[in-house]
């Protein structure tokens, strides 16, 4: 698997309601995009999931944030942005089920106990988002849902350390490629 194919999914800073280069900005969503792709591949059920929708959700799940706290409702606000703007900003997204992309965004912030159906795509998105908790010094691999994600905790720290000051989504993605991800990651 080569991460080059993620380029069409990279988030534009203008999509964010606030602070595109803050802790929930471009760097974060790009790392979540990378981890979503890697986790989907590692779990091995990529053909059984709505992969394109997962990637669009990863790249847009926090665009509706108003602050860097819990910000209840940011998933729903991001879902609204997806429904209203994603296809205009990225015509290639027209091929995706935007209703499902919006659903993933809405539910990514909800505690697992309050979700009636935790789809494989949502599980991957939540674990990918969880891996980037390294940026706020709060990654506990035991809280991740899959062993596949837990095994990536050290790599998540490395990717964050190398991209902490990245100025664009492209720079974050290129760093992951230069690190040899996913091939260089232990299984």
Image (spheres, grey):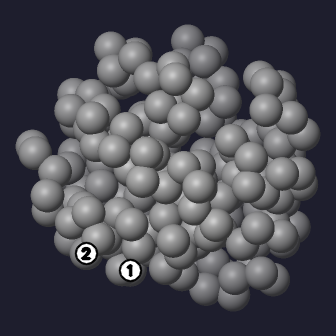
Q: Residue at x 78, y 57 (%)?
A: 20
Q: Give the class, few, some or many, for how many residues have Cα within 10 Å of label 2's Cα (few <14, many ≥20).
A: few
Residue 41 lies, with reference to residue 86, above or below; the image says above
Residue 48 lies, with reference to residue 74, above or below; the image says below
Q: Quadrant of residue 166?
A: bottom right
**x then y, percent, for residue 109:** 66, 30
**x then y, percent, for residue 117:** 51, 29
Q: Residue at x 49, y 64 (%)?
A: 172
**x then y, percent, for residue 110:** 66, 24
**Circle 2 residue:** 2
Q: Quadrant of the N terminus?
A: bottom left
Label 1: state its secondary structure.
helix
Q: Give the class, few, some or many, for how many residues have Cα within 10 Å of label 1's Cα (few <14, many ≥20).
A: few
User: In the rendered image, is residue 98 in sight?
Assistant: yes
User: In the rendered image, is residue 124 in sight?
Assistant: no
Tally the numbered discs. 2
Residue 120 lies, with reference to residue 115, above or below; the image says below
**Circle 1 residue:** 5
Q: Tell which of 50 and 60 is nearer to you.
A: 60
Q: Tell which of 57 and 50 is nearer to you.
A: 57
Label 2: state its secondary structure.
loop
Q: Residue at x 54, y 35 (%)?
A: 135
Q: Residue at x 29, y 71 (%)?
A: 178
Classify residue 101 as left or right of residue 176: right
Q: Quadrant of residue 111?
A: top right
User: Do the residues under discs 2 and 1 have CB atoms within 8 angstroms?
Assistant: yes
Q: Which mark is residue 70?
A: none
Residue 146 lies, with reference to residue 143, above or below; the image says below
Classify residue 42 as left or right of residue 98: left
Alpha-carbon distance for marks 2 and 1?
A: 7 Å
């Amino acid at each position: 698997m080569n991460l080059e194919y993620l380029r069409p999914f990279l988030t534009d800073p203008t999509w964010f309601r606030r602070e595109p280069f803050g802790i929930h900005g471009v760097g974060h969503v790009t790392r979540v995009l990378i981890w979503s792709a890697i986790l989907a591949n590692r779990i091995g059920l990529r053909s059984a999931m709505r992969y394109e929708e997962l990637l669009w959700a990863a790249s847009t799940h926090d665009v509706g944030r108003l602050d860097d706290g819990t910000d209840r409702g940011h998933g729903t606000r991001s879902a609204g942005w997806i429904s209203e703007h994603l296809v205009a900003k990225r015509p290639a997204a027209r091929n995706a089920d935007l209703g499902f992309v919006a659903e993933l965004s809405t539910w990514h912030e909800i505690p697992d106990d309050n979700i009636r159906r935790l789809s494989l795509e949502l599980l991957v998105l939540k674990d990918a988002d969880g891996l980037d908790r390294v940026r706020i010094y709060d990654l506990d691999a035991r809280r991740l849902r899959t062993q596949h994600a837990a095994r990536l905790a050290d790599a998540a720290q490395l990717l964050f350390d190398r991209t902490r000051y990245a100025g664009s989504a492209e720079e974050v993605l290129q760093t992951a490629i230069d690190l040899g991800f996913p091939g260089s990651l232990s299984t």
